[in-house]
Structure formats: structure tokens, C-alpha cells
Amino acid sequence: MMTDASSTIFQDKIDQDIRIEPKDWMPDAYRKTLIRQISQHAHSEIVGMLPEANWITRAPSLRRKATLIAKVQDEAGHGLYLYSAAETLGISREEMIDQLHSGKAKYSSIFNYPTLTWADMGAIGWLVDGAAIMNQVPLCRASYGPYARAMVRICKEESFHQRQGFEILLTLSRGSEAQRRMCQDAIDRWWWPSVMMFGPNDDASPHTAQSMQWKIKRFTNDELRQRFVDICAEQVKLLGMTIPDDQLRWNEERQHYDFGPIDWEEFRNVINGNGPCNKERLAARVQAHEDGAWVREAALAHAEKKIQYGKTA
Ligand SMILES: [Fe+2]
Ligand SMILES: [Fe+2]
């Protein structure tokens, strides 16, 4: 039950930057917002494994293969920490998985684009993991304890992902003419979807104000997007490549890069299930879940046997 006293205590904690923990009283809307955000985040990590897993067998060297396997495995770990964090709010893992598989829950629209060449592994690391870091570093200070703590390790790993991606592109950018073309083509295809990862513009993002008041969010979508553009506009010079935006230029007055308009029609289309790979991604997840049923059953049977024989190890 909500009482005036408990809601005052809650808001005081938020204002003083004291973390909210699972057993603390919290407003229903705060709980719901977190469940939605954390579970969408978890789904994105898990679905995000798919476009890159496609390239594990085709990575050009043993070093690249080992790195890519490690990265994809990290993403699985991120999904698991986040599902666990969401579970502390009173939703079960089964329910979340079910929402993903039935199409009720969303995940980041970026993962509905295809990975056509090896250079895409570089562009995803540099741009997609780069955008993820920009979004996620402030979440290490989110007001909900389990979410904030999960983000600390996730961010460390994301930063490694970002650097390995940039290094792939740097290598290609110093390679043959064909490799340079492949590098530019991957940047061209991944740039705008990455810029869209920050979500709608602030004036079209009705939940932002509330989330900021609850200190779940610390910066608005447009603030984070601007930071991302500013950083990438400089980094792309090291590659000797270009960003596919003819309106991208330094604005001395604003001390930021100006950039061209975002195609929100495309964003909405992909979010609503009509991106190039939505059906494929979801089908792959459902298949993996069904194929893994025997593992879950076996693990459960094993755990029950241990209890039965009184072993604790
Ligand atoms: Fe991740
Ligand atoms: Fe990552």
C-alpha cells in the first residue's frame, strides 16, 4: 500500500542519491518502468548475440575468432545479469522470455539489421557498442541498486568491445582498396541505425522527465546522441573514412557537431517488427529456447537430486 510516509522516504532517498533496493518500498510506476527498461535491455543483449554469431566461423584469423567468441559470450553474460536484476523486481525469467518470444517485449532495433561483411563486426563494435556505452555509463549511477551494480561490469566489457571493433576497422582502413571499400560500406550502413539507438528526440520522449526525476536516467536522449556524434566525428578521421551525413559539421558557437535529420519513419518501422531481420532474429531465439529445453530439465533434475541426497556443493 502506498502511504504518504513511504513515498516521502522513497523520494528522499532518491534526492540524496541513496540506492533503492529490492525490499524497499517503491511506487508501482517506478517498478513497472524499471521492469520494462531492464528486461528490454536484457533482451537486447541476448538478441544482440545473433548478428555477430553469424561471423564466428568466418572470422579471418584465430585471434579474431577467439576475440569474437569472447565478445558474444560477454553479451550472454550481460543478458543474464540483467534478467537477474529484473527478477528482483518481482517478474519471473519465464515471463520475460515469453514476452520476448511472443513479440510483446521490444529489444533494440539495431539488431534487426543484417551483418553482410566482416567489416560489420568492426562497425558494430565501434558504433553499436560505442552507442551502448554512451547510454550505459550513466546507468551505473541509476537509483535502483541491482541495475546500477550490474551496469558496472557491463560497461567495462562494452568498452573492450568498442575498442576491438575500432581496431578491426583500423586494420581494414590500412589494407587493400577492397578492404577500404568494405570498411566504408559498413560505416555507411551502421551509422544511422546507431544514431537511432538513443531513441526518439526529447520532445517525442514522454517518459524522459519522469525517469530523470527518479534518477533512472541522468541525461536525455538528445544529449547522449550529441555526445556520440561528437566523438565519432573525430574518431572517423583516424580511419580516414567518412560518416554518411553531408550535414555533419563542427559548430563553433555550440561547440558541438551539427548533423542531418534522422529518418524516424525507418526507426518506427524496424521497432514495429518490419526491419530486414526481425522475423529471423525472433525465430532464432525461439528455436534456441526450444532446443535448450532438455538442458533446463536436466539442470533442474540434477539440482533436485542434490537436495535429495543432502549435498550442498
Ligand atoms: Fe552488452
Ligand atoms: Fe557489447
Image (cartoon, helix red, strand yellow):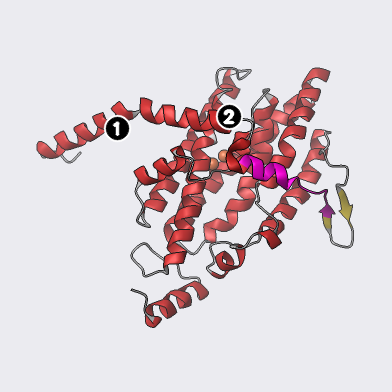
Identify the residue shown where x is 66% and y is 61%.
Answer: 220
Q: Is residue 85 above or below residue 102?
A: below
Place of residue 170 in the rendered image (x, y in percent of width and height, measured from the top left): 74, 30
- Which residue is farthest left? 309
Is 194 inside the magenta-drawn segment? Answer: no
Residue 176, visible in the rendered structure: no
Residue 221, visible in the rendered structure: yes
Place of residue 167 in the rendered image (x, y in percent of width and height, measured from the top left): 69, 32
As drawn, the label of residue 296 is 1
Place of residue 176 in the rendered image (x, y in percent of width and height, measured from the top left): 81, 18
Q: Is residue 115 above or below residue 312?
A: above
- Report the front residue among 129 and 88: 88
Stretch in magenta? 257-270
Q: Which numbered disc, 1 or 2, marks the residue that appears first in the sequence?
A: 2
Mark 1–mark 2 Cα distance, whole angstroms, equals: 25 Å
Dot 2 amino acid type: Pro
Answer with left or right where residue 197 lies relative to residue 21: right
Identify the residue shown where x is 52% and y is 75%.
Answer: 15
* Residue holding disc 2: 51
Dot 1 amino acid type: Arg
Place of residue 110 in the rendered image (x, y in percent of width and height, measured from the top left): 63, 39
As drawn, the label of residue 50 is none
